Amino acid sequence: MILAMLGSIRTQRVRVSVALLGLLTAFNVNAGWFLKADIGQARADDRNYDNNTQVLSVEDRDTAWLLGVGYRYNQDWAVSVNYINLGKGSAELQADVGQSPEDYHRTVAKVTPALGHGIGLDVDYTLWENDKVSLNGIGGA
């Protein structure tokens, strides 16, 4: 039934959306599966650059977010896989008249703070829990 419905949908984007919606519905049926989302702020450390570089501005903070799916094995243990995006950094430099565009962009790349993105794996252990509050230890890579 589901395969017939997916086959009748014409665009790939809608197929993927319907498949994800079905997958999320399946997660809700099984009490062990969960979705997680986090939002916060990321800040990059200062980059080392030549003192002769005239930096006009540096943006080293951005909104960070995480989306993940996990499985709770029992009351104490859970594992999740997450996509983490720490945002983007930027820099503006005073252009040197004699500098080529390639050299300018190379210098900007050296000065611009690096905020990354990637996949993470978390293991969660519940240290303490009562009716309204819990204390968890989370480790991951």
Image (cartoon, rainbow, N blue to C red):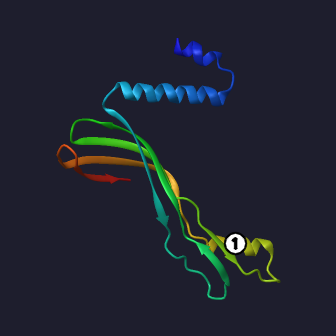
Would residue 7 be found to the left or right of residue 68 on screen? right
Q: Is residue 43 above or below residue 46?
A: above
Going by the numbered disc 1, the residue's amino acid type is Arg
**Residue at label 1?**
106
Q: Determine the residue positioned at 35% across, 48% down.
A: 122
| Number of numbered discs overlaid on the protein picture | 1
Q: Nearer the viewer, residue 36 or 93?
A: 36
Indicate the position of residue 132 as horizontal and vertical percent values: 22, 46
Q: Is residue 15 left or right of residue 46?
A: right
Q: In the rendering, at what x and y percent does residue 23 appear?
A: 46, 27
Which of these two is toward me, 2 or 37? 37
Farthest residue to the bottom: give it.
52
User: Vertically, is 1 above or below 95?
Assistant: above
Dividing the picture into quarters, in which one does residue 60 lie?
A: bottom right
Q: Kindly state the secondary structure of the residue where label 1 is placed.
A: helix
Q: Is residue 111 above or below residue 139?
A: below
- Furthest residue in direction right, as rendered: 98
Q: Is residue 19 left or right of residue 53?
A: left
Query: In x, y percent, where is residue 67?
Result: 46, 45
Write the residue at 80% across / 76% down.
100
- The residue positioned 49% from the left and 25% from the top of the image is 22
Q: Quadrant of residue 69?
A: top left
* Residue 9, placed above or below residue 54: above
In the foreground, 135 or 88? 135
Other-residue count near label 1 (Cα within 10 Å), few / some / many at <14 / 14–19 / ≥20: few
Image-based side of 140 in relation to 117, left or right: left
Taking the spot 49% from the left edge, 73% from the top edge, the residue there is: 45
